[in-house]
Image: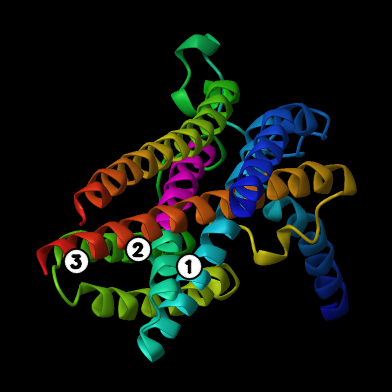
Amino acid sequence: MKKWIAAIVLCVLVVIAPLAAQPPPPAATDEFIPMSEFSDREVLPATPLVFYAYGFAWVALMSYLWMTWRRIEQVDKDLQAVKKRLP
Amino acid sequence: MGQTRLVAALLLFGAALFAASPFVIDAAPYESTMGLIQRIFYYHVPAAIVMFASAFVCGIASAIYLANRSPRADRVAIAAAELVVLFGIIVLVTGPLWARKAWGVWWEWGDVRLVTSLVLWLIFVAYMMLRRFAGPGSDVLAAAVGVFGMANVPFVYWSVNVWRTLHPKTTVVRTLAPEMLIPFYWCFAAFVCLYIALLLLRVRLEKSRNELEAVYAEIED
C-alpha cells in the first residue's frame, strides 16, 4: 500500500514539477495600445543615436585638429615677432 | 620638414580610413540582440583603446620626466594627457548613446567600467588643470598625477572581468566574427593614425611654446 502511495506521489510530482517551473502566463490583454504610445525605450530608434555617436567623434577630432593647428600658427607668429626684438 | 610630412601623411591616411569607415561598418552583419546600435562599438572601443594607450604614453613620459627632468619627455606627457581627455570624451559620449538603446539608461552608476573610465578621464582633466593653473612646480606635480593615471588603466581594463555588471568582458573582441573584425580593425587603424598625427602635432606645439618662453626669458635677462 505504501509503495502505491509513494508511486502516486512521485507521478504527481513528476507531472506538477515542470508545470510549477514554467513562467507565469502573460497577463490578459483587455486593450490594444498603439506603438506610438508605448514607452520611449521600446520605440527608441537606433539610427539617430549611431549618427550622433559617429558625428560627435568626427566633430571632436576635427575640432581638436583645427584648434591645435591654430595654436601652432599663433605661437609661431609670436615667436617670429619676439625673435625680431632680440638684438 | 620630415616630421611635417609624416604628420600630413598620417592625417590624410587616418582621415581617409575614417571617411570610409561608415561604408566598411555597413558591410558588417548586425549583432543578433542589439542590432544597429551595436555599430557604435566600432568607434567606441578603438577610442577607448587609444585612450588607454595615451594614458600609458603620458605615464611613461611623466616617469622619465620625474627621473631626469627631460623637457622632451614633459612635452610628450602633456600632449598625451590632452589626448587622453580628447579620446576619453569620445568614449564617454558614444558609450551612453549606445547604453540608452541597449540598456535603457544613459548612465549606470553600478557599472564599474563606466565609473572607473570616468575617474580615469577626470584624473587627466586634473593633469591638464594643474598644468594650466598651478603655477611654478606644476610640471613635477602633474608628472606624478600622470604616473598615477597610468596606474589606473589596468584597473579600468580588468574591472569588467572582476565585477560582472552591464559591460561585456574583455574577451568580446576575441569572440567577434571575422565579418565584424574587419570594420573593427579598420576603425582601430583610423584612430591610431589620427592619434599619432595629433600627438606629433601637439608635441610640436609644446616645443614652439618652450622656444617662445626661452626667447622671452632671454629678453628679460
* Location of residue B95 in the rendering, given as x and y in whole percent from the top left corner: 50, 45
For residue B122, say whether it is visible. Answer: yes
Question: Which label's residue is closer to the chain start, 2 or 3?
Answer: 2
Name above or below for residue B58 compared with residue A12.
Answer: below
Badge 3 crowding class, 10 Å Cα cut-off, few under 14, some 14 to 19, many 20 or more, is: few
Identify residue for label 1. Answer: B55
Query: Secondary structure beneath disc 1?
Result: helix
User: Disc 3 residue type?
Assistant: Glu
* Majority secondary structure of magenta residues: helix
Please give the name of the residue rendered at 41% of the width and 41% of the height, measured from the top-left corner.
Answer: B106
Q: Residues within 10 Å of mark 2 (few under 14, many from 20)?
A: many
Q: Chain of mark 1?
A: B
Image quarter of residue A73: top left
Q: From the viewer's perspective, is residue B94 above or below residue B52?
A: above
Residue B155 percent across, percent down from the top left: 49, 75
Mark 1 and mark 3: Cα distance apart in space: 34 Å
Does residue B164 appear in this view? no
Q: Nearer the viewer, mark 1 or mark 3?
A: 3
> Disc 3 is attached to a residue of which chain?
B
Q: Which label number is shown at residue B218?
A: 3
Mark found first going from the N terminus, 1 or 3: 1
Location of the C terminus of chain A (image quadrant)? bottom left
The magenta region covers B82-99
Q: Are marks 2 and 3 on the same chain?
A: yes
